[in-house]
Image (spheres, rainbow, N blue to C red):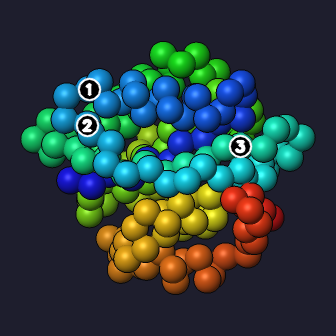
Amino acid sequence: MKVYVSLGSNIGDTDDNLNEAVARLEKYEGIDPEIWSETYLTEPQGLKDQAWFTNQIVRFAVDPELWSPHGFLSTLQAVEGQMQRVKKEINGPRIIDLDLILFGDEIVDGGDYLTVPHSRAKERAFVLCPLAEIDPELVFPDGSKVAELLSKINYRIEDKKIYQD
């Protein structure tokens, strides 16, 4: 099953943080990274007075016999904890942020705990641009195509820097 994860970091060596998160995830049985997008520098959303984020999308091949969306999310949160992520404020600085964007074609409406596809993925250029890079024909479970979604949001990209208000 194809599972898409958005990775972000704006504390410390951000590229190393992204690589470390993927390395930790691939140690779990049934989670294999398949393809990585380029990294993008992204203007912070909401709280502007902080360092820009390094963002990336990684597509994983996940064994559906071993993993459910809830279990996979718990594992993402465990990796964030292992890497000393501290949640101080919404949209604030973080050493690592791992968001489950898509879990195959599954739809989960779990309120605040888990929503798949990710509730804000279709509005975020830092998710959609790298998704379009690694899987330009990707279609969300509701039939939305990545290219169509990108055409509906206000953003610009310059030399792998994404600006979005």
Q: Residue at x 49, y 26 (%)?
A: 20
Q: Residue 31: x, y in percent?
A: 26, 37
Q: In this rendering, would 106 be left or right of 65?
A: right
Can residue 75 be seen at all in this image of the molecule? Answer: yes
Residue type at numbered disc 2: Ile
Cα distance in 3D space between marks 1 and 3 = 26 Å
Residue, disc 3: 53
The quadrant in which residue 84 appears is top right
Upstream in sequence: badge 1 or badge 3: 1
Q: Residue at x 55, y 49 (%)?
A: 56
Cα distance in 3D space between marks 1 and 2 = 6 Å
Q: Dot 3: what SS?
A: strand
Q: Residue at x 66, y 43 (%)?
A: 54
Q: Residue 14: x, y in percent?
A: 66, 33
Q: Residue 69: x, y in percent?
A: 29, 44
Cα distance in 3D space between marks 3 and 2 = 25 Å
Q: Dot 1: what SS?
A: loop
Mark 3 nearby-residue class (10 Å; few <14, some 14–19, many ≥20): many
Residue type at numbered disc 3: Phe
Residue that protrudes farthest toward the left in the picture: 65
Mark 2 nearby-residue class (10 Å; few <14, some 14–19, many ≥20): many
Residue, disc 1: 28
Query: In the image, is residue 149 above or below residue 59?
Result: below
Upstream in sequence: badge 3 or badge 2: 2
Residue that protrudes farthest toward the right in the picture: 49
The quadrant in which residue 135 appears is bottom left
Residue type at numbered disc 1: Tyr
Give the position of the C terminus as an image quadrant: bottom right
Q: In this rendering, would 59 be left or right of 51?
A: left
User: Disc 1 vs disc 2: Cβ atoms closer than 8 Å?
Assistant: yes
Q: Which mark is residue 31?
A: 2
Mark 1 nearby-residue class (10 Å; few <14, some 14–19, many ≥20): few
